[in-house]
Image (cartoon, helix red, strand yellow):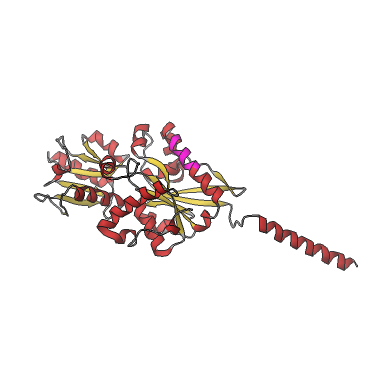
Amino acid sequence: MKKFFVAIMVVAILVSAVAFTACTPTRFREYYTIVAPDGAPALAIADLPFEIEGDGLSLRIERKVVSSSIISTEAVKSDVDMAIVPANLGARIFNSSGGYKILAVVTNGNLYMTSSISCEVNSLQDLKGKMVYSIGQSSVPDMIFKTLLTNAGIEYVVSEEAVAGKVAIKYYADGSEVISQLALAKSENKLAFGIYGEPAVTTSFAKGFEQVFDLQKLWAEIDESSQSGYAQAVLIARDSVCEDSEFVNNLLYALKANENSIMVDSAQAVANIKAIYPQSALQANVTMDVIERCNIKTVATNTSAGREYYENTLKAVMAINANLIGGKLPSDDFYLE
């Protein structure tokens, strides 16, 4: 009789455990990782809370910042749940393997063109016959600039020197190298132009460079979306993360809150990044004006307007090199319902 009673109790416990499991979200970990490239995009996660609620559970957020040159390999590591990546890379990852969804555009363009010496530039036509040193070959910024030139009927060529009647582009790994080339041109009293991003742009003004174009404003003039820029970097997440709709909604809310907090205390935002990535290129003296020019705004892509905004950027990339997004626009499965 005693053995029978024990057996009944064991069955009851097992049944209760199954019932509890059926009502409780399956969770293999109590945290999610999110990785971002150093520089302006990292500011999109600078002030994220350490914990975010999801399906009744409080989930710890582990932020990670890496060099922009290795973000593509970091983004697809098995221990990374979410990643901020270039807009075209997000599409290419999905088109090649699936398994991800896009949550939002988080960086809406932070590129500017400066000149080595003072000059009068009224339109892109004034760049003909000139050298333009640029970051990001075959990246979204590169495609945006080439689209602007093509739309204006201007030919361009990759070249080591200026070419009559065309815009000559020479690429460099990062903004510091572009700035060095502009400084060299300035020392020789030669006119050259550079395309690179904030916060390096504002820092370079101390060298006597002048801003001639805001590429975001130029793009807004030809883009039909209501946004004041283009999709430069996006947040993607594994499908398993997106199954937790409460977490995703709270994360998007936290990203919007981050927009405001990094403007209120820019020094703290930079300090937060340096705490997890000491070698960050972000400087402690970054001002609110510079943060604003970094264009960190969350545009959720689960709306028709947000999706259209993102796809407008992808279409610009496709028109020049479709392989950069995996040959086609991502299917509906890439977007949250």
Residue 259 forms part of the magenta stretch: yes
The location of residue 320, given as percent across then percent down, is: 25, 57
- Name the outermost residue toward the right: 1
* Residue drawn at (28%, 51%) of the image: 136
Magenta residues: mostly which secondary structure?
Answer: helix
Q: Work out whether 286 lies above or below 68.
A: above
Q: Kindly tell me whether residue 278 is visible in this rendering.
A: no
* Residue drawn at (46%, 40%) of the image: 256
* Residue drawn at (43%, 31%) of the image: 264
In the displayed structure, does residue 239 sit left or right of residue 28?
left
The location of residue 260, given as percent across then percent down, is: 44, 35
The residue closer to the viewer here, 16 or 135, is 16
In the displayed structure, does residue 280 sit left or right of residue 10?
left
In the displayed structure, does residue 88 sit left or right of residue 24?
left
Q: Quadrant of the N terminus?
A: bottom right
Q: Work out whether 213 lies above or below 25.
A: above
Q: Which residues are magenta?
A: 253-260
